[in-house]
Image (spheres, grey):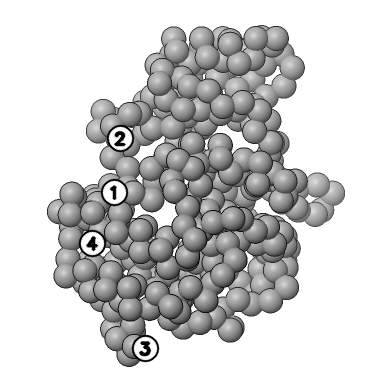
């Protein structure tokens, strides 16, 4: 078995996996196959991802960060959460690759999926025509619609998190967790405290969301595998469902902030932004501004821009109150 891992700085968030433990885990999980090579992939910014080749085919392997890695509140238990959501995700759409097994590698959680041949959309989008990209956006809109047609019994992240009976309770809990992160990381500001008070004031409006819908949580071209064939192009898989949760479709950051084109909404069947409740939209933008403030610590960036966005959110919420 040939193992190839990416060399990383000791301070990097992603760290190599113990090679001996990796070999032992794969020999156990794929005991009826001969593993020929394990190659780490440069894609991804949270888990370590690998292509595992055997005498019977290939697999995608994902391994969680090391214990003690600096994760934010909304990133806790991501691998466990993906395991909890696996059945919901795969039953709602055949584009989500099935999960073959969950296990550990040197105390780091991991899972295997079938390898899907294709290309990551974001890596080739610049080489595609406008018509080809629009085709993919329509298909992604159709995928999102299928997921959002699936309902859950509670709001928020799946186990081991506790789910909530009210949407506002999840939003308040999620923001409180990230606010605590901001204190721990020394990026707490008065605007974060003001924003938390706004959430309490608008709880009744947030609770107009009465049915928890299935959200992918990271639905953008970086997590979409496409395949070109006979002059056409199609989505063949949507991956990285670890951030999936139950809630308001409008709160998925990609729909709200990424700027999906009209082709996406054509595939979806309606544009959620056209009739969006202004309070909910602004609250969600504030939640992601807070997350972006935390991310500046991880990526050693200036927090000025997300702080300005959060201040603008507070100003908008003041005007809406």
Q: Residue furthest front?
A: 165
Q: Where does label 3 land, which residue?
A: 320
**Mark earlier in primary sequence (2, 4):** 2
Q: CA–CA distance between discs 1 and 2? A: 14 Å
Q: Identify the element where label 2 is drawn.
A: loop
82 to 214, vertically: above or below:
above
Residue found 73% across the figure and 73% down from its top? 269
- Disc with the residue nearer the chain's start (1 vs 3): 1
- Out of 24 and 35, give the one closest to the viewer: 24
Instruction: Tell which of 320 and 289 is nearer to you.
Output: 320
Name the front one of labels 3 and 4.
3
Quarter of the figure that contains the N terminus? top right
Mark 2 highlights which residue?
69
Q: Residue at x 61, y 72 (%)?
A: 261
Nearer mark to the viewer, of 1 and 3:
3
Label 1 Cα crowd, 10 Å radius (few <14 / some 14-19 / many 20+) = few
Tag 1 secondary structure: loop
Q: Is residue 247 above or below residue 245?
A: below
Residue bearing mark 4: 303
């Amino acid at each position: 078995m040939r193992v190839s891992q990416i060399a990383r700085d000791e301070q990097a968030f992603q760290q190599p996996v113990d090679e001996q433990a990796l070999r032992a885990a794969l020999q156990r999980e794929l005991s009826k196959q001969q593993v020929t090579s394990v190659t780490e992939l440069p894609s991804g910014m949270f888990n370590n991802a690998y292509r595992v080749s055997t005498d019977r085919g290939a697999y995608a392997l994902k391994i969680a960060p090391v214990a003690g890695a600096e994760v934010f509140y909304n990133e806790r238990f991501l691998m466990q959460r993906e395991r909890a959501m696996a059945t919901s995700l795969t039953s709602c759409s055949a584009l989500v690759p099935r999960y073959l097994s969950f296990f550990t590698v040197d105390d780091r959680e991991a899972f295997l999926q079938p390898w899907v041949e294709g290309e990551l959309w974001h890596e080739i989008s610049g080489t595609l025509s406008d018509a080809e990209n629009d085709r993919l956006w329509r298909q992604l809109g159709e995928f999102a619609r299928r997921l959002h047609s699936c309902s859950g019994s509670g709001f928020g992240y799946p186990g081991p998190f506790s789910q909530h009976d009210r949407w506002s309770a999840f939003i308040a809990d999620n923001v409180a967790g990230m606010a605590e992160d901001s204190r721990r990381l020394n990026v707490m500001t008065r605007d974060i405290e003001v924003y938390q008070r706004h959430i309490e004031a608008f709880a009744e409006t947030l609770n107009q969301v009465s049915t928890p819908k299935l959200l992918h949580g990271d639905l953008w071209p970086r997590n979409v595998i496409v395949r070109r064939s006979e002059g056409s192009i199609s989505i063949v898989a949507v991956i990285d469902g670890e951030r999936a949760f139950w809630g308001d479709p409008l709160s998925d950051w990609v729909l709200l902030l990424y700027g999906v084109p009209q082709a996406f909404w054509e595939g979806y069947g309606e544009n959620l932004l056209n009739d969006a409740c202004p309070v909910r939209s602004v609250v969600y933008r504030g939640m992601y501004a807070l997350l972006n403030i935390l991310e500046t610590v991880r990526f050693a960036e200036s927090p000025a821009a997300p702080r300005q966005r959060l201040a603008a959110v507070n100003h908008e919420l003041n005007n809406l109150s």
